[in-house]
Every structure is written in structure tokens, then in C-alpha cells.
Image (spheres, rainbow, N blue to C red):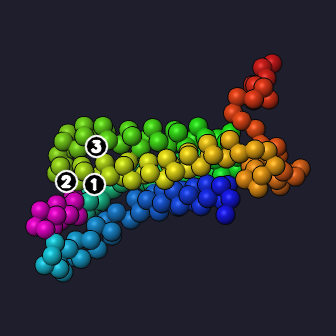
Amino acid sequence: MGTLKWIRIWLAFFAGVLVLSGLTAFPLVTEVRLLSGLLHSTSLSPDWLVVWVDRIRDGLVATGRDHPFIAYGTDWLAFAHLVIAVAFWGPWRDPVRNVWVIEWGMVCCAGIIPLALIAGPVRELPFGWTLIDMSFGVFGIVPLIVIRSLIKRLAAAPEGQDEQVQAGEHQHGQRKQRKVGDPDDRVLLG
């Protein structure tokens, strides 16, 4: 399997997880009720986790009952995940030219760490939950590192190999492999 196919497999995985993450931000009350029921049905659940999930459930139920407009914030969270997933369409079409999207995603993953370390205590989250939140950045950056290294390999591949970037093939046949910074990348002004 060629490098371009591997890039697209990893991109599909990463974007798919973003979409799944976004979609799960909509039905929070239902999900937390199910999680609470599951934790109560097993004796293997740590007590601190049961107490914390029940507190989240009670808070979401009370907020939904008394202040349903607050959930609009998590609707935007969900939307943001979906929009971010769409941003990875650029690297899907032309990975070499759009490697910056991958690097931007890596910066975003790294940014999760300080956000969780600052906002977690401010919002009175247990430290264990803060660690879980930080794990999204740690695990999220792994496929992006793989994708970036594959894109660098693709950019270095000699012209004519089967690993050529196939962006735009729906228009006028295959487009020639180009490195970022070629003179044709200039922005024409006026």
C-alpha cells in the first residue's frame, strides 16, 4: 500500500474520532445517565468515580430542567468538533500542500494540556478527570505525528512513483508532485 493511502487511512481515523466525539456532545444527559447506571451495576467501579459521575448526572439534569439554554454551549462544542474534522479534508486532497493543517492539529492537541491543568482546578474537577482530559491531547497527537511523517515521506518521494499526490485528479488528470514553497505557491495580489 502506498504512502498516500496510509495518509488517508490515518486521516479517516482521526476525522472519524473527531466526528464521533462531536456527536457524543449532544446527548450528554442520556449518556451520563447510562454511564451512571452501568457504574452502579458493577462492584468493580471505584467509589470516587461513581460519586463523580452521579454528581455530573445530577448537575446536568438540574441544569437541563432549570436552565436548558446552558446546553447550547455543548452544542457549540459538538459543532466545533465537526468543523475541525472537516478541516482535515485539505490534507486528504493534497497532503503535501496542506501539511500545515496537521501541524495546526498537533498544536491544538498540545494546547489541551495547559487548558486542562488550568481549567480543571478552576472548575473543581477531580485531578483524575483532568488527567483523562489531558489524555485526549496525548492520544490525539499520535496519529497526527504519524500522518505528518508520512506526508514528509510523500513530499520527498521522487516524481513518477505511485506515491504521487493525486489531488485534483477529478479535474484534469493527476497533478504533479510539488513541494511546499514552490514559486507557484505565491499569492497573487491585485
Q: Where is residue 159 in the image (x, y as percent from the top left)?
A: 79, 44
> Which of these two is toward me, 66 or 132?
132
- Give the CA distance from mark 2 to mark 1: 6 Å
* Secondary structure beneath label 2: helix
Boundaries of the magenta span: 46-59
- Give the x, y percent position of residue 178: 76, 38
Residue tagged 3 = 116
Element type at marker 1? helix
Residue at left 47%, top 42%? 106
> Can residue 103 be spotted in the picture?
yes
Residue 132: give its label.
1
| 10 Å crowding of disc 3: few (<14), some (14-19), many (20+) | many
Q: How crowded is mark 2: few (under 14 residues within 10 Å), some or many (20 or more)?
A: few
Q: Mark 2 points at which residue?
A: 128
Residues marked 2 and 1 touching at CB (< 8 Å):
yes
For residue 176, above or below residue 26: above
Looking at the rendered image, the quarter that the N terminus falls into is bottom right
Q: Do the residues labelled 3 and 2 touch (CB within 8 Å)?
A: no
Count of numbered tags: 3
Residue type of the residue flagged with mark 3? Ala
Which quarter of the rendered picture does the C terminus lie within?
A: top right
Circle 1 Cα neighbour tier, 10 Å, few/some/many (<14 / 14–19 / ≥20): few
Farthest residue, direction left:
47
